[in-house]
Amino acid sequence: KAGVTQTPRYLIKTRGQQVTLSCSPISGHRSVSWYQQTPGQGLQFLFEYFSETQRNKGNFPGRFSGRQFSNSRSEMNVSTLELGDSALYLCASSLGSGGRRGYTFGSGTRLTVV
Amino acid sequence: DQQVKQNSPSLSVQEGRISILNCDYTNSMFDYFLWYKKYPAEGPTFLISISSIKDKNEDGRFTVFLNKSAKHLSLHIVPSQPGDSAVYFCAASEGGTSYGKLTFGQGTILTVHP
């Protein structure tokens, strides 16, 4: 079966712009989480959506937002981009709450802010 | 404050021998622990998990041990194979609806030499 699909794979944006990243979870998965990976901070949790509701939120500023649609597809948006937002953004999906099977990750979107 | 720590940035092992990757945590509310493997340009891949009510879980060549009193977990890979060479992350989550919020360690680069 298809895995977690993230689009686009690569993105270059200018400081001050905004960006939207997309994630299509594995069919049937209702939980979608987003993570930011940088060399300095590692993998950091952004937020989790379950059945269109934000269930958990990490310690990121309000410029980072997300949403989930009725088909479980999710988008995250970053407004007023800063150079420090350059990172690999990973999406992960799960049937419910991870548990024994953990979360399945996509290959990520590499965002570069110039 | 880093709640999950992997103190060894790298580990080098000979093929056929045991690889032991370690992880320490500080948050006593964590009750589920997971190990992920990551290759370059790919998202993390789920390996094995353990609940806080257990002290050991096995899956093929992979065994995870949990010592709650020491707040320490380890991943044993026996026997190690060159294809195991990757970055290994441990992750932890609290219970209930916070399962979806994973806190990751910084990762350990495992190199298995033929």
Image (cartoon, rainbow, N blue to C red):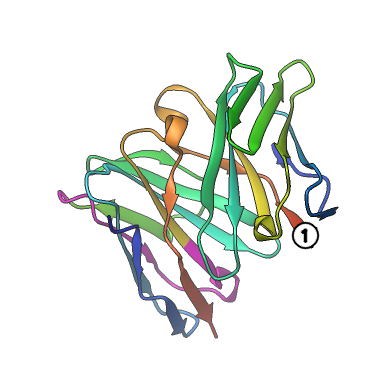
Magenta span contains residue A78: yes
Q: Residue at x 60, y 22 (%)?
A: B29
| Quadrant in which the N terminus of chain A is drawn | bottom left
Secondary structure of residue under mark 1: strand
Query: Is B58 above or below relative to A77?
Result: above
Q: Residue at x 66, y 21 (%)?
A: B28
- Residue placed most toward the observer, A34 or A57: A34
Q: Which amino acid, mark 1? A: Thr
Q: Quadrant of residue B57?
A: top right
**Disc 1 designates what residue?**
B111
Tell whether B112 sits left or right of B46. Answer: right
- Residue placed most toward the observer, B101 or B75: B75
Which residue in the rendered view is the most extreme toward the left? A70
Would residue A31 be visible to someone looking at this image? yes
In the rendered image, residue A3, in percent from the top left (x then y), is placed at 34, 57
Q: Residue at x 45, y 83 (%)?
A: A13
In the rendered image, residue B1, in percent from the top left (x then y), is placed at 72, 41
Query: Is B5 above or below relative to A25?
Result: above
In the rendered image, residue A65, in percent from the top left (x then y), is placed at 37, 56
Magenta span contains residue A3: no
In the rendered image, residue A6, in percent from the top left (x then y), is placed at 36, 66
Tell whether B43 sits left or right of B84. Answer: left
Q: Residue at x 50, y 45 (%)?
A: A58
- Residue placed most toward the observer, B103 or A25: A25
Q: Which residues are magenta?
A: A70-89
Would residue A59 be visible to someone looking at this image? no
Chain of the residue where label 1 is placed in the rendered structure: B
Number of other residues with Cα within 10 Å of mark 1, as a class: few under 14, some 14 to 19, many 20 or more: many
Query: Is B6 above or below relative to A37?
Result: above
